[in-house]
Image (tube, helix red, strand yellow):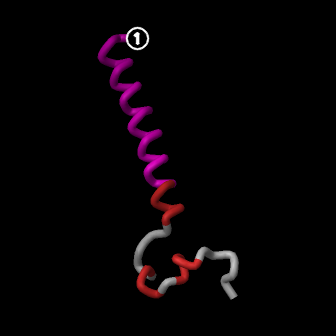
Amino acid sequence: MNDYLPKDELDPKRQNEPSRNRVVLWIVGAGVGIYLIGTGVWGIVTGG
C-alpha cells in the first residue's frame, strides 16, 4: 500500500515521531530564520 515510504517510516514504534525529512526542513528553516534575524540586528546595530 505505502510502497513509496521508506521502511523506517512504516515502523509502528515511530508513529508519534516526526519524519526525518520534516526534522531536516525545520533545521534548515530555523537556520535561515536565525540568519535573517542576525543580519537584521547587525544592520540595526551598525546603522547600515
Inspect the magenta stretch and tell me whether residue 17 lies in it.
no
As drawn, 47 above or below 31: above
Residue that appears at 46% across and 87% down: 12
Residue 16 in percent (x, y) is at: 41, 79
Residue that appears at 49% across and 69% down: 19
Residue stretch rendered in magenta on the structure:
25-48
As drawn, 45 above or below 37: above
Residue underneath mark 1? 48
Q: Give the dominant element type of the magenta stretch: helix, strand or loop.
A: helix
Residue 27 in percent (x, y) is at: 44, 50
Q: Residue furthest left?
A: 45
Secondary structure type for disc 1: loop
Q: Quadrant of the C terminus?
A: top left
Q: Which one is in front, 31 or 7?
A: 7
Q: Quadrant of the N terminus?
A: bottom right
As drawn, 16 above or below 19: below
Residue 10 in percent (x, y) is at: 54, 82
Inspect the magenta stretch and tell me whether residue 43 lies in it.
yes
Residue that appears at 38% across and 18% down: 43
Q: Which one is in front, 34 or 14?
A: 14
Residue that appears at 42% across and 46% down: 30
